Every structure is written in C-alpha cells, then in structure tokens.
C-alpha cells in the first residue's frame, strides 16, 4: 500500500438522499453508486452513459434527472449516471462529481439533442445563481502522514484568510483539451532555474504545459532526472511505471514557476511512503516521469496533482464555460508553503509521518490477520 491514493469528498443531496462523493477537477460528469438506494422522484431518461478510468474501473448506467443540493446551492434538474455497484468508488464514497467544463462531459454528449438537460453540476449551479462569481477554490490541509486531509472548498467566494488570491496573476487556460490546462515558466531545483524541455513548449520555446487537477503527479523525464536521479542511494523499483526508492531522509529543494510566481514545494510532497514486500516502510518518488513519445495523443508535459496542490490555494474560474460569464477561463495560484520553514521542519515532520505510517500499518495488519 502507498500513501498517494488520496481523494477529496463532499456531500451532495440527490432526490432527498445524501451521498458522499469524490470531487474531481479532471472530469466533468456526475455519477452515483446507488446500490441499495431507491429514487422516488428521479426521472430515468433511459439513455445509457459510461465513464471509464485508467485503472480499468468504470461507472455505467442510465442517466437520471433529479433535484440536487450542493452546499447552499439547489439545482432543480440535475443529470447524473445511476451506476449501482460501480467499482470506481473508494474509501466508502458513493460516487464522483466532476468539476471540469461541460465540453468534456460524456453525459452532456449523450443527452445532446434530447429533451433532457445534460449539463454539468457546475454549469447548472452558476446558471441557477447568475449573481454568483463563476469560480471555485481549493485549499488542501495536510495530515500527520504528510498527505491531504480535509481542507477548504468554496464556490463563488474565497476563504477570508486567503482572499489575497484574487490579486494573484491570472493563468489563462489553454483550450487545447478544454481542461484546467495552463502554461508554466519552469522549475527551480536546488536554487537553479530550468525551463523548456517539454513536448509542448510555448511560443517562446521555454514554457511548458501544466495540467492542474486533483490526481497523481507527472513531470517530463528531464525534470524528473534533475529532481530525483541525482539523489544518492536512489534505487529503481519499476522503470516501466517510473517508481524509484529514495532514502527516507531525502530533503529536496524544488519550486514551480507560473507567470513569474514561485511556488515552493514542501519536501514532504516530493516523496511518498509505501510498504515493500517485506513489510518495511520505504519512500518513493511522488512525481513520476511522463512518456517521452512525442506522438502520444493528448500528452501533457506536467500533471501537477495532489503533491503540488497541497502547496497552493488555487482558484479555478470557469469564465465562458458557464452561461453567465463571457471572460476566458483562468486559474489563480497563491503559494502557501514557506520554503525555509518547510526545509527546517522536514526532519521532525518526516519522522512523525513515518511513525504514524508504521502504526497504521500495524493496525491494518492486525485487523487483517483476525
């Protein structure tokens, strides 16, 4: 087991019943595992839709329409895939709510041309509340294990303690994939600035494309080598999947640069804890190298997932992905990690997360052996 399988959840009420669902900025569809649930006032469109994932899990079922409540927002008619028994749930969640634009929604495509509204939750929310600012924000809290645990999620407003994010530079979204995709300037490793070396460099041949979503992290091989391959004692565990073992006391000094803004990465977020075949605690790289095949379809240079997002307060503005805003979509980033403090605190916090990890492992193994 490893500590990288992190999900972020929220409660959504559909047809009067509450569901804890994953929040995913990398997709746009809403589906529910409705096993042992009976919908009384939901309308079955009898139109089949299916969402598949890279880990081969899926959610398949008829699209239903029902009243939904998300936070303080009510949506009279919301489309969702009714997927009883889906194997794509985890940690007792009951479905997934995609926070991406309607352009990538499978439900919207399936219902297009029908008598039903197949728009996404966020599109319908902003449409129903036209005076609400068309953005969401995330701030991910850190657990004792160094992974995300809780945090802040807002719609149409910022957290009062982090309102200065509205003054940060706007990172305009690239429309290449209709996703939360933008350009980044480069990476600082041990005080040295590096740029370019991506498959899809910008017009200046220096910037690279970065996908800012709640998923695992991927970086170009060039940057992977700069960050990890120079670490003394590194061992290859799986070259195929880009997994390498690092000494657990590895304290790395890395920042990402966006539009001139430096975002320091806490060294706790550059490695992950795992357990090897001998039940020993080991540390592995948190960012894996991307493919180097230049003809790979839809390949992005950087996928800066959870490990990056734990170091920023991030604002996603939907702009003209909604019916109420004609501006282009953009992202704003407010760094939350103070690099000098993170570097100084690393040893004590790292030892604490290893101890916590091993305690959790003992409890897991003990309960499994009964």
Image (spheres, grey):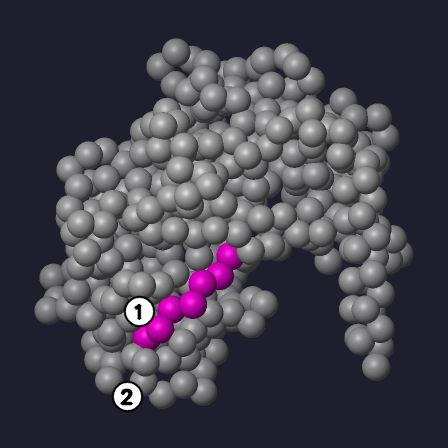
Quarter holding residue 111: bottom left
Residue drawn at point x = 59 percent, y = 13 percent: 193
Vertically, is 131 above or below 74? above
From the viewer's perspective, is 135 left or right of 89? left
Mark 2 Cα shell of 10 Å, populated few (<14), some (14-19), many (≥20): few
Where residue 143 appears, x then y in whole percent?
66, 52
Query: Is 1 colored magenta in this rendering?
Result: no
Residue 349, numbered label: none
What residue would you read off at disc 2? 40
Relative to 192, 244 lies left or right:
right
Q: Is label 2 in a helix, a strand or a loop?
A: loop
Work out whether 20 lies above or below 212: below
Q: Position of residue 344 (x, y in %)?
A: 76, 29
Q: Residue at x 23, y 66 (%)?
A: 75
Count residues near mark 1 (Cα–Cα under 10 Å), then give few for <14, some for 14-19, many for 20+.
many
Q: Which residue is mark 1?
A: 69
Q: From this viewpoint, is residue 47 visible?
A: no
3D distance between C-alphas at marks 2 and 1? 16 Å
**Magenta residues, as a range?**
8-14
Residue 54 in the image: x percent, y percent? 51, 54
Rendered image quadrant of residue 266: top right
Q: Which residue occupies the foreground of this view, 205 or 282?
A: 282
Q: How many marks?
A: 2
Residue under the point 73% across and 29% down: 343
């Amino acid at each position: 087991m490893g500590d990288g399988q992190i999900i972020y959840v929220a409660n959504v009420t559909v047809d009067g019943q509450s569901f804890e669902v994953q929040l995913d900025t990398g997709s746009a569809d809403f589906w529910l595992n409705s096993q042992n649930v009976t919908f009384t006032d939901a309308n079955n469109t009898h139109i089949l839709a299916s969402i598949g994932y890279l880990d081969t899990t899926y959610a398949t079922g008829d699209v239903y329409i029902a009243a939904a409540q998300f936070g303080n927002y009510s949506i009279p008619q919301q489309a969702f895939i009714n997927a009883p028994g889906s194997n794509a749930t985890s940690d007792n969640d009951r479905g997934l709510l995609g926070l991406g634009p309607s352009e990538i929604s499978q439900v919207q495509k399936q219902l297009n041309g029908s008598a039903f509204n197949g728009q996404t939750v966020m599109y319908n929310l902003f449409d129903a509340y036209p005076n609400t600012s068309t953005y969401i924000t995330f701030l991910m809290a850190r657990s004792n294990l160094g992974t995300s645990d809780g945090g802040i999620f807002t719609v149409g407003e910022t957290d009062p303690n982090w309102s200065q994010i509205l003054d940060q530079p706007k990172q305009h979204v690239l429309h290449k994939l209709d996703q939360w995709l933008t350009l980044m300037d480069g990476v600082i490793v041990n005080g040295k600035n590096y740029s370019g070396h991506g498959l899809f460099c910008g017009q200046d041949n220096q910037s690279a494309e970065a996908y800012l979503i709640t998923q695992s992290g991927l970086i170009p091989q060039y940057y992977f080598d700069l960050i990890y391959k120079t670490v003394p004692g590194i061992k290859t565990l799986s070259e195929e999947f880009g997994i390498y073992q690092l000494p657990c006391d590895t304290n790395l000094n890395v920042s990402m640069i966006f539009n001139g803004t430096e975002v320091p990465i806490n060294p706790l977020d550059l490695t992950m804890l795992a357990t090897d075949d001998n039940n020993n605690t080991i540390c592995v790289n948190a960012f894996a190298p991307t493919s180097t095949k230049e003809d790979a379809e839809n390949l992005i240079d950087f996928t800066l997932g959870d490990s990056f997002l734990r170091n920023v307060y991030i604002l996603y503005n939907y702009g003209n992905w909604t019916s109420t805003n004609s501006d282009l979509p953009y992202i704003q980033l407010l760094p939350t990690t103070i690099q000098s403090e993170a570097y100084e605190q690393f040893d004590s916090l790292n030892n604490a997360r290893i101890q916590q990890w091993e305690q959790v492992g003992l409890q897991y193994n003990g309960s499994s052996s009964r």
